[in-house]
Amino acid sequence: MANSTAAAADPLPHHPNFHPSFSPPSSPSQSSSSTPSSAAELITVLNPATADPLATISATPATTIAALVAHANEQFRQGAWARADASERFRVLARAGVLIRERMAELVDLEVKQTGRPVREMTAQLGRVGEWFDYFASLARTHQDDSTPFKGPVLNVLKCQPLGVCALITPWNHPVLIASKKLAAALAAGNVVILKPSELAPLSVLKLGEILREAGLPDGTLSIVNGYGRETGKFLCEAKGLAKIDLTGGLATYEAVAPTAARNLTGLTAELGGKAPVCIFQSVGAEKGVRAALFASFIAAGQTCVTGSRLLVHERIYDEFKEVLVRRVAALRVGHPRDEHTQVGALINDAAVQRCSSFIRKAEEEGDVILCGGKPTSVDGRGYFFEPTVVETQRKSFLSCHEVFGPVIALIRCKDEDDIVRTANDSAFALGASVWTDDFAQAHRVADKIDAGVVWVNGHHLNDPSSPWGGWKESGMGKENGVEAFESYTKVKSVVFNYGIEPSWFDEVGAGTRYG
Ligand code: NDP
């Protein structure tokens, strides 16, 4: 376990939970205040590149969560944000976009330290996060109510209203990006939000809370609580009074959360895992195909839900592709995340390294060939690193069927287009997929046939606040991004204005009296 309970005299900086207008109920375990009262309430956040402790956070207990959800519902009812004019929501969220850009260096620093991801990656990723606030600010301002062709002298207006109190549960791999995708949509629609980031990487998300407050978000509209998923996350998802849960995480977490959500009639969006196929056809050639694969597979050290974790390569270029791929993967620079030249950073914790090793053992048992990598490594003798790894395998192998969430990539020879499509779709997951071809007709054909919520043609990892993102099958349900996400944070109220039908049903009996 990367995180541990800290000693009482721990000199590390403490990052309190963020809930500006809420005072936790007094109790012996009053852990949500800025000064926790006992060591048992503290969780230490580690830097995975060195295994050094970075900071402490407070674990939020069940009583505090219950009181916070009740408080959040009261804030929603009072309506400082829920009933704020659209132009006010626009102003605050657009300002947040500006402030995020101004605080970029601070956010990048925190993200690099707590995730172990290279500074180059985090600078590029966070450089776009402000756009999520720009986009959803604009949507808040421009989204229009609808009307229907209702029969007769009736005007039927469909109003999108905010849901209420929404719980956002986010992972550690893109802490600020994923929190922003959910937050910007939920807030634009007028909801009150309680966000629980992963306890492995919460620091930058807490900073995001401060930024939103500075942008003018009314106190009580956003709270950020810390703690382990199995405790704080569970308490939050089980609390009565939630209108929606928006989870990004693994299938096991979805399975833990979904039954309670169903019982409480709480809406649920689930962005889960993936086993993204990278379909490489002969027309792109081996060199370009390898460049595509390197980016798809090894960004974030393979720790993204759309990691190109299955390379499906047409047999006409397979041998050359394999030779170039192995050479380029072996040359990837694994290093300290702070080093601008580092291409592959740390994994999140020791458990992630052990998980990669267990996939290698299983692959060897099944007779797969480890073409390069395959072992844990370190930088200056420290940290949680794993060598970038390529395993030659076949489509039904354990590696081909299960998510690693690390830099262990399956390489599969395919004999033709049908074989590539069949192999791509032969998965329990259906989140992202990429198709690499210079054949225009093939690009359309294959994109149509692939089972995935997001299909890129001649690209991978491309993302935009306007573009719906989400998986099918075991990759989840619902969408982030786009109008779909905004509307998923609203409920439709159908308001029927009658301007000509008299309430005369019981006055007379006769043809033409309208009932419904
Ligand atoms: P987890 O499911 O372990 O954790 C995700 C979040 O859920 C964390 O905040 C975690 O808290 C919390 N959590 C864990 N258990 C519970 C529970 N019982 N009730 C409520 N909350 C809980 O996933 P990882 O953090 O390990 O992330 C990796 C997974 O997320 C992968 O499967 C990956 O593919 C998927 N993912 C999907 C994305 C998508 O867009 N579809 C994007 C990124 C990742 P804590 O960490 O504090 O324990």
Image: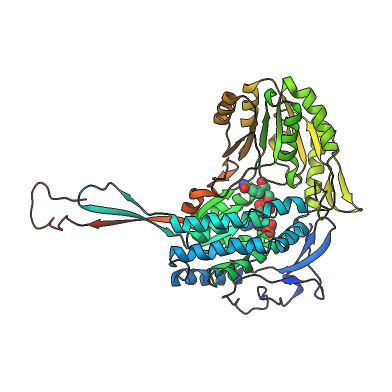
Q: Which residue appears farthest toward the bottom when viewing the image?
A: 26
Residue 242 place in picture, x, y as percent: 51, 62
Left/right placement of residue 257 relative to residue 502 reads: right
Left/right placement of residue 195 relative to residue 380 reads: left
Q: Residue at x 66, y 59 (%)?
A: 229
Residue 422 place in picture, x, y as percent: 62, 26
Camera-side residue of 149 and 260: 149
Q: Residue at x 55, y 61 (%)?
A: 94
Left/right placement of residue 391 relative to residue 396 reads: right
Asked whether residue 245 is in view, the answer is no
Residue 258 place in picture, x, y as percent: 55, 52
- How many labels, in total? 0
- In the figure, 364 relative to 102: above or below? above
Asked whether residue 354 is in view, the answer is yes
Q: Residue at x 70, y 61 (%)?
A: 107
- In the figure, 172 relative to 360: above or below? below
Colouring used for the render: rainbow
Q: Assign the N terminus to one quadrant of the image.
A: bottom right
Quarter location, residue 57: bottom right
- In the figure, 455 relative to 133: above or below? above
Q: Which residue appears farthest toward the right when viewing the image?
A: 381
Residue 385 place in picture, x, y as percent: 83, 49
Camera-side residue of 308 and 423: 308
